[in-house]
Amino acid sequence: MRRGIATVSLSGVLADKLDAIAAAGFDGIEIFDNDLIASPLSPAEVARRCADLGLSIDLFQPIRDIEGVDPRRFPDVLHRVRRKLEVMNELGATTFLACSNTLPTAIDDLELSAEQLRAVGDLAASHGVTFAYEALAWGRHVNRVGQAWNLVERADHPAVTLAVDTFHMLARGDDGRALVGIPGERIGFLQVADAPVLDMNVLEWSRHFRCFPGQGMLDVSGVVAAALDAGYDGPLSLEVFSDVVREADPHVTARDAMRSLLFLEDRLGARVTGPAREKVTVAPPLPARTDAAFVELADPDRTDYPALLTGLGFHVAGRHRSKPVVWWRNGGANVVLNEEPAPGPAATALGLVAPDVAAVAERAASLLWPAVDRTRGEGEAGLPGITSPSGLHLFVSAERGQPDDWHNDFVTDDAPGTFVSDDATATPPADEGWLGLDHVDVTVAADDLNQELSFFRTLFGLRPEDPEEYIQPQGRLRIRALRAEKGDLRVALNVSETGAAPQPHGVTQLAFATADVVDSVRHARARGVEFLRPPANYYADLDARFVLDPDLLTVLQDNGLLYDRNDDGGEFLHAYTLPVQGGFQVELLERRGGYTGYGSPNAHVRLAAAARAGSAVA
């Protein structure tokens, strides 16, 4: 499958864009007319540069508003097309794109529009090229692919083909079924873009929020699969408009774009049939399930992390065979404390159980996600590491008891989980019923959100939940949670936008589930752990909203717990520590009755309490 990208999908000037596109391994490009107009390179020089870089020019995008035109003005259209065809011949391109008319003066007359497309087809054929007619989602009279195909059929000209654009189709509510009956050889070009699902003007949606496949929520693979099954044999070409790509480094964008096409092809492997199935590259499969195993804290400065962990009820369970790394455990919750050199204290990595380990590593490599460099001693688990765009490291472990099980890297007195202490007279504390790591909050820059979403979706198959937004004391907080289809891994991606000091990026919250959060918080407070205290007004509001049992309300308030309840009676009780070194908080929580959310109605209270505590924590 040939892979292409439109020059409009990257920032910079045309020469820089071409270099970035070639470096990312693309086969061809669409040249956006504005890029060429602004370039000091002549069309012939652009053609030579592309040839030197190994890029074909698959599409030229210079024309719009060519049909539904007042016949008195149509000669001007033909003049414009003729001049652009001269440029196109110098470029060596053989297909140009023509978008449906968006002008308020456009005439709604099928026969007139078909006649004008036929006239443009004659002109294109005289120059030895074809054009692909595209229905813009905001076109005046032609804004759906079925309407565009109707005009192409009526024009009945070999140089007039149909352009299929996944965004324009899906934004208008069409899907792959809209292409049924359209011969593949009549599809002149296929443009690919994803987008988040937004309720807004379609033009604004298109210009500012398109993204690469795997970063949005549209059924891109369904449309592409339908085109391939119909017999389309051209390139898959990305055309993305967004505020993010206009500002990002073009080499970073080009690499993300290539990764997105590889992911799209992987998705197509399960949807296309016949000869098209052999053209797509299929990555190793998603892991059978993905579970959280441990959190790694970097502690190069020997901070008070051990005191914090002890206060939270953790005890030392093992020591690494070859590195200054200590395993701490509380029930099913595991924390790995790493004293190797690092920029500073922080929560830096997650351990995951995601079989098959080798397949996950191969999938990461095939999708161009960077591996973590690390040394391994003899007999230690492989634990392949992958780095997310935000810099979070993920280490992949096999299931318990397998050769690549992370527990095997730690020496214990007897069996994994046995208490280890430098004090020979010490006795292990009793586990307090902690169930494990419930979720992790990762704060990312606004421009990195799509990349981070793509990382967890494409590599581990996590499912994004609906976006949420909250008001902070000095700005807003956007949250996009993801959850494993199979397994217990949950990650909440945060974008904190404030007018105050820059917010920390990376892991900003570690949430541990307990069987009895009231008991866990009481014990932690008794051992000196400081928690945020919601104001009395919050508990008065709880009583008004839920008509809580007075005894429960008292327990919540006495222990500084937040509370939520869903329509099915599921309950969520949670509390937050003050921010600790490394810029994160610890959340203790208890889920009752099948509650699956995150206590979102309490976010504004938590954020205000954190601000009062002296830190605006996202």
Image (cartoon, rainbow, N blue to C red):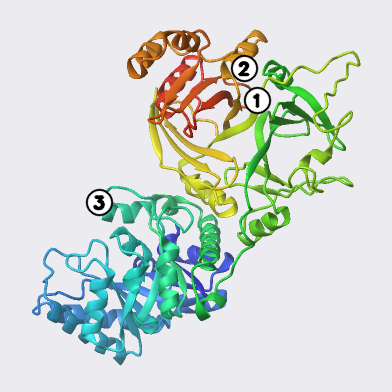
Mark linked to residue 201: 3
| Farthest right residue in view | 424
Residue 116 rendering spot, x and y as whole percentages: 18, 82
CB within 8 Å, label 2 to label 1: yes
Instruction: Please say if 11 is above or below 131.
Output: above
Residue at disc 1, secondary structure: strand
Q: Is residue 279 visible?
A: no
Front residue (pair 297, 316): 316
Quarter holding residue 231: bottom left
Residue type beneath disc 3: Asn
Q: Which mark is residue 513?
A: none
Name the residue at 40% across, 29% down.
Answer: 566
Element marked by disc 3 = loop
- Residue tagged by mark 2? 520
Closer to the N terminus: mark 2 or mark 3? 3
Element at label 2: helix
Residue pointed to by mark 1: 434
Q: Amino acid at mark 1?
A: Trp
Real-space Cα separation, disc 2 to disc 3, in angstroms? 49 Å
Query: Badge 2: how crowded within 10 Å, few (<14), some, or many (20+)?
Result: many
Residue found at the far left of this picture: 72
Query: Which of the two labelled residues, at mark 1 and mark 3, occupies the earlier sequence position?
Result: 3
